[in-house]
Image: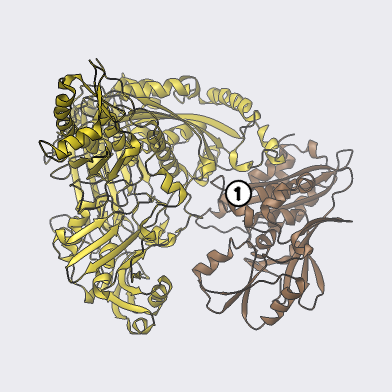
Chain colours: A brown, B yellow
Amino acid sequence: MNFNITTPETTQELLAQISKHQENNFRFGAGYTDLLLELKKQPDEDLTVINLAQLNDEHFTSISELDDGIRVGTLVTANRITYNEVLEKRYPVLYEAASKLASRQIRQVATIGGNLCTASPAGDIACALVALEARCEMLKTDGTVIVVPIDDFFVGVKKNCLLKNEILRSIIIPSNSENSKLYSGFIKVGTRCSMEIAVVSLAYHIQSDENGKITKAGVAIGSVAPTIKFAKSASEYLIGRSYTSIGTSKAEEFATKVLEYTLPISDIRASAWYRKEALFNISKSIFESN
Amino acid sequence: MKKELKIIGKPTPKLDARIKVSGEAVYGNDITLPNMLHGAILRTKYPVAKIESIDVSKAAQLPGVVCIITADDVDTNNISYLNDHPVLKKGEVNCIRDEIAAVAAETREIAQKALTLIDVKYKVKEGIFDPFEALKEDAPIINKFAPANNDKNIAHPFHYEHGNLQEQKDRSACIVKKRYNLPRVTHCCMGTCAVTADYSKMENRLTLYSQTQMPFLYQRDMAYTLKMEPSRIRIIQPIIGGGFGSKLDMYPYEPICALLAMKAGQPVQIAYDREEEFLASPTRQTMVIDISSGADKNGKFTFREVKIIMDNGAYTSWGATTPFVMMQTFSSLYQLPACLFEAYAVYTNNPYAGSFRGYGNPQATFAVERSIDLLAEELGMDKAEIRLLNANFKGEITGQRLEFISCGHRDALEMVIDKSGFDGKHCSTGVSQATQQNMKNSRSDTLVACGMSLKYESSSDKSVASTIFQRNSERYKRGIGLASMVHVGGGAKIYPSDGCGTTVKLDNFGYLTIITGSSEIGQGSETVLGMIASEELGIDMKNIRVINTDTDVKPWDVGVHASRTSFVAGNSLLGAVKKLKNKLSSKAVQLLETDIEDLEYENGLIKSRKTGESIKTDKVVREIHFREPNELCEESYYYEPDSKFQDKGFKGNVSGTYAFAAQAIEVEVDTYTGNVRVLDVHVAQDVGKVLNPLGLEGQIEGGVVTGMGYALTEELIIEKGMVLNPSFHDYKLPTAGDVPDIHFYPIETNDPKGPYGAKGVGEAPLIPTAPAIANAVSDAIGIKIDDLPITPEKVLKALKERIV
């Protein structure tokens, strides 16, 4: 495995490097947990890796409070997400997804940007961010910033919407409604405790008001379609209902709506039948405290 | 008076622990020699094809490539005990591992690159990937080197019987017939395959740095393959990163490496990466086991009738002889009046199987122990009671003429039944399943509420989702299962000798060198040998070293297999030490003016018990060396167990002694996802005598986890001869987080033949695990488990089918 490597330290240097390599083959390297495996398998002789490890740009590296939400830089690692108490409290779905990614050692270096840009239908953090209806903030080489809803970021299996002269710098997670009660979590189905790629995953972030009425709901599913899917009708189904009054039959109706968004494949990890069956069961399970 | 033991039985860290954890240890792929080249192997693109041409010219022109070989360039004999496996394939390929060409180059990268430049023209052919297809009349011959006297595509047939089968069938009150399917799993050694070959043309001498676990048979096999004299080949074993049976055979990459070194005139190393390890290293046999077993109205077993079809793959390895071990289980695990056993290793175009810890016994024990649960259910008998009623006993000579001179079978069963609370937990007959299930679930809720939620779904304890699950009452079902096993515990006489030689050398500074024929592959044998010598000679462990890695130096031993090393090498060492002690004692009695019986070896001293006077052991050595009788303090001994070579009907006492074990395992099944979580594993094992509790614990825990993987998650998935999951991402080896609480209760039966009463322990711990887990899952959710691994998908499907 041979490649050229360049390590920009400032935003300017970064944009200059991206511009410089527009005609060449280049990849971004952040945590390298996926990239090195990929390059080992398919060595590419004229490849340049733009190494982001030394980049000093808070948009990429920090977790910061905004008026309408929280900004998480794409170079933030999975472990940093799990160590952040604000994220844990406000967005349990993100916290749980980050805690279930691969293994602790990999979480130490794997970044949120890598998880998103890989655009795997099984991405854990990505699934949580879709449920949270996050926005993706992308930087162009001319310095302009574009923001797209995360749902538009994924365009196919392992395909994102970034152009060659763009880089994903931050994720903006919208604020929760004030005084809302949260029902938020991430369920990952696989066969092992760690080092697992989700066979099915479900991310949900549900907010209700003082009276217990659900005011906002985001439900996303992974590994059951070419991309992570926001289950819109299932999310909408919950609005106006009281979380605690959703019994078995309503939970199953909800689960049926979640399944509308599936287009699963059968492969060595699981059959399409299993993915749907397990998804149905875990979808209804989120109301079983009632 | 029983002598009190000072070190045997005390937890002793492994001698190689420090260098291994610090990274100082030199493994096979760490070896570097001056001018060493790197070898790489071109394997076929298609499992079955005619090779129309091979063009290496472009590869040869690549700068840095030193030599390339194909079948046309070499003169070799076939490998494997049936001589059915060409080292480099000529004209045709028959399985996806097939080696077509090999390159030696200055760097690994150049060698890999060169492989891509070799142009092979294939004519793809249809393959046979199902052994039942291979047995059909119109099937083509898969291996043209197959033994001519066998039926078509049968590499090795086995037939065994004892007792009067018909009579026992007639008196059976209940007969259970089942077909079990056992999967293909692989060893996953942390150290991947690596060999380094160094050839001196001038001296016609080949040195191989090899990870073999059978150095002397390997030396012989290598010599036969390369048409050399065995003594011209020196085998040096670097530190081996796991064997588990995978290094019992020699594989083509090893003579290929030697051939490259001979042609290049420079040392060559071939080291697999993880993907090649998955693609090209051996596996456990997949088997289809048809078993019918019976019991009389009191629950006494009457007979077992077994037919096994094993997928041999395209070539044969020692693994094809696993029926030899399986028939011991079918004929002799629990008292059994009659047994008929047939097994066929059948050629297919799948990757070939090899030998793997347990050597057929995990498969056989699965079939026996699953069937026992079914018999108990049919008879309405308690699953513990039926096992205790039929348990093996001390003094038993089985139908196969295995002689159980010590036997902890019943003790092991009773121990795990008691410790696991089996009687109160399991669903006894299946009749009152519903009531029992309710009882169990309510109890399981209490435990779940205490925070024992499914590990997988709550890697964070504070997770909102998991608190929701914890209160769910219908979702999780618990069950408990029981299984036991018998395995050779004192070697296995499958070769003219099952012996081991040892030389001990005490130097005039009081340091002891043990030169043993046995090999260390991580099992902790050199530590046990050090402990034995320390115990006997009163020499501190720090002053003992074990030399066991060089065939030019060490005496003969058959190799690491059959859980034999502590037993056979231990007894061999005891023999050598006894001779050494005789020599030391006869000098010491002169110096201390006492008699032999009065002497005691302790703390580097030889003492007189009567007078309390002592003399330093090294001083005695110097007296022997430098004064009369002017001799070396060096002695050798060869130990041969008194086991027997079995007759043509496979009858005879094949091992010095036998090991027994039982496990009771509790599981929790998530009926929403089909995930099975192993909660508690209770292991009782007849180890004869605990030599090193630390090493033993490691063997038990490692074995159980291997058994868990076999039961639940592991399978090398092959489709039309292609390996679909050659990575740890998709080959689901259990991770640290999956390991349950393992409770171990050693049973000490003090075997009369074992060193200090010990018997073999290495393979046993994994053997009962899969059937115990399958029995537990069946107990939890009332479905029959006939296939491994018990994947979430299989569980969910079975639950669904039951509801519909």
Quadrant hosting residue B230: bottom left
- Measured as percent of width and height from the top left, residue B239 is found at 35, 51
Q: Please tell me how crowded label 1 is: few (under 14), some (14-19), or many (20+) other residues with Cα within 10 Å.
A: some
Quadrant hosting residue A168: bottom right
Question: What residue is pinned by disc 1?
Answer: A104
- Measured as percent of width and height from the top left, residue A204 is found at 73, 48
- Above or below, A252 against B743 in this view is below
Secondary element at image label 1? helix
Task: Residue B61: tell me if it is visible.
Answer: yes
Q: Is residue B77 left or right of residue B745?
A: left
- Depth check: B221 or B432 in front? B221
- Above or below, B253 against B131 in this view is below
- Above or below, B303 against B119 in this view is above
Q: Is residue A43 left or right of residue A90?
A: left
Q: Is residue A238 left or right of residue A229?
A: right
Please state the chain letter of the residue tagged with numbered disc 1 in the rendered image.
A
Give me the residue at 32% from left, 22% from top: B410
Please, which residue is most extreme toward the front here?
A: B627
- Measured as percent of width and height from the top left, residue B193 is found at 36, 58
- Depth check: B718 or B538 in front? B538
Image quadrant where one finds the C terminus of chain A: top right
Give me the residue at 58% from left, 60% from top: A33
Callout 1 amino acid: Arg
- Measured as percent of width and height from the top left, residue A287 is found at 73, 39
